[in-house]
Amino acid sequence: MYKVIVADDEPFMLEGWRTMIDWQGCGYELCGTATDGEEALELINHVNPDLVVTDIQMPVLDGLGLIRTMREELRYDSQIVIVTGYSEFGYAQQAIRYRVNEYVLKPLVPEEIHELLRNLIIPLDTQRQEIENRQAEEDEVIGIMDTHMEDDGMMEEADLERMTFLAKQLLALIEAGDVTGIDRTVDDMLQEMRESRTAMLWTQSAVRYIHGELLRRYGMIGADQALLQGRTWHHTESWFMGDLKKLFIRIAGSFALTAQADPGSSGLVAEAVQYLKEHYRTKIKLQQLANHIHVNAAYLGQQFKREMGVSFSEYVHRLRIEEARRMLRRTNMKISDIAFELGYHDAEYFTEKFKALTGELPSLYKNNNQG
């Protein structure tokens, strides 16, 4: 049995992890749960788990802070699964650096979690064998590290930055449907993987990051996620035989078909929506957005309303209120502070918009939805 802990600040999510997942049937033992990163660290030091499952957004210490502490300060080599929501995951270099192994999209689907857990058995078995073999080689490894540590550290950082760049580039090429660009960039990635041991490790982590980002983005546009459940993501040997390239090209085709089926997810409106999702916390006007994407403001406003079904300003309010709901559930911030954080300089106006879109006051929502 492999030992697992789960960190998530939402009571219903923790209950789902406890009751909906057949841990024993998949070869694991759930050894405890935590509601924030600091509590998780205490549990990790006590349990020494083989697998850590963590949400990103948590109070006190968030998921990436937890992972950073595990990897850089405590030197834990546990397998890591990130639970990611619709807009929470945008931390390419951190995810690659901290070697995140898998990603779960909310809400939990037991069948998908069971498949993920079974897939993780192979790297867990490999890791356990490596630990058993490490002691015999320890003296030799330490000697090598003492001699080459400075040079290796510089090479490792360079490889990490390069793989982060390639991962971001591949995501853009996949979403653009650029088959030629995908072909060339995957070749570059695999060539660097052949030439450097550290590049090989960062490449594996970069592909997992791409996997996680595609999972999140597919979830946002409602596309078929079958391509994201295949074994190609984990079979490094098959990447050199063209499987990784084929997978990315198929996903690019799937994105293109989905965009054609959903006019609101293509063209200038899609660009406007993406910009708003990244900047909705700031004071933003239609003219400013139109200037950014080089289009007439009146035309953009008309197209936005036609394709999205709501006006530009109403869409911004919806993004803000959805984030406000999350913050009310998962933080102890004052309502006035949340309003200010989301671009409302008048708490009463924020309360008015919140009630109009949710049917209840923010204070009542907070009382009814915090554990």
Image (spheres, grey):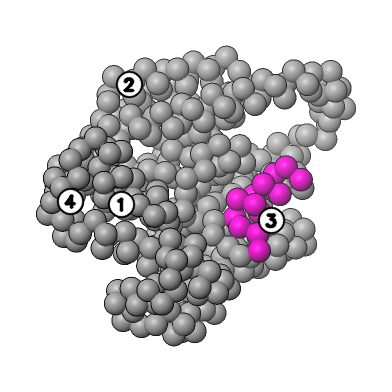
Give the mark, 3 or 4, whose residue is nearer the N terminus. Answer: 3
Classify residue 331 by image quadrant.
bottom right
Give the mark, 1 or 4, whose residue is nearer the N terminus. Answer: 1
- The local crowd at label 3, few if under 14, some if 14 to 19, many if 20 or more residues have their Cα within 10 Å, is many
Residue type (three-letter) at the residue carrying disc 2: Gly
- Identify the mark at residue 301; answer none if there is no mark: 4
Q: Between residues 284 and 83, which one lies in front from this camera angle? A: 284
Answer whether residue 363 is visible to the viewer in this image: yes
> Could you tell me which residue is drawn at 39 percent across and 82 percent down?
361
CB-based contact (under 8 Å), mark 2 and mark 3: no
Question: Is 63 a magenta residue?
Answer: yes
Q: Between residues 125 and 287, which one lies in front from this camera angle? A: 287
> Could you tell me which residue is drawn at 53 percent across and 17 percent down?
192
Q: Position of residue 181 (x, y in %)?
A: 32, 21
Report helix, strand or loop for mark 4: helix
- Identify the mark at residue 285; answer none if there is no mark: 1
Residue type (three-letter) at the residue carrying disc 1: Lys
Question: Is 61 a magenta residue?
Answer: yes
Q: Nearer the viewer, mark 3 or mark 4?
A: 4
Report helix, strand or loop for mark 2: helix
Residue type (three-letter) at the residue carrying disc 3: Pro
Q: Between residues 273 and 234, which one lies in front from this camera angle? A: 273
Q: Between residues 198 and 36, which one lies in front from this camera angle? A: 36
Residue type (three-letter) at the residue carrying disc 4: Gly
Magenta-tinted stretch:
60-73
CB-based contact (under 8 Å), mark 1 and mark 3: no
Q: Nearer the viewer, mark 2 or mark 3?
A: 2
Q: Residue tagged by mark 2?
A: 181
Q: CA distance from mark 1 to mark 2?
A: 35 Å
- The local crowd at label 2, few if under 14, some if 14 to 19, many if 20 or more residues have their Cα within 10 Å, is some
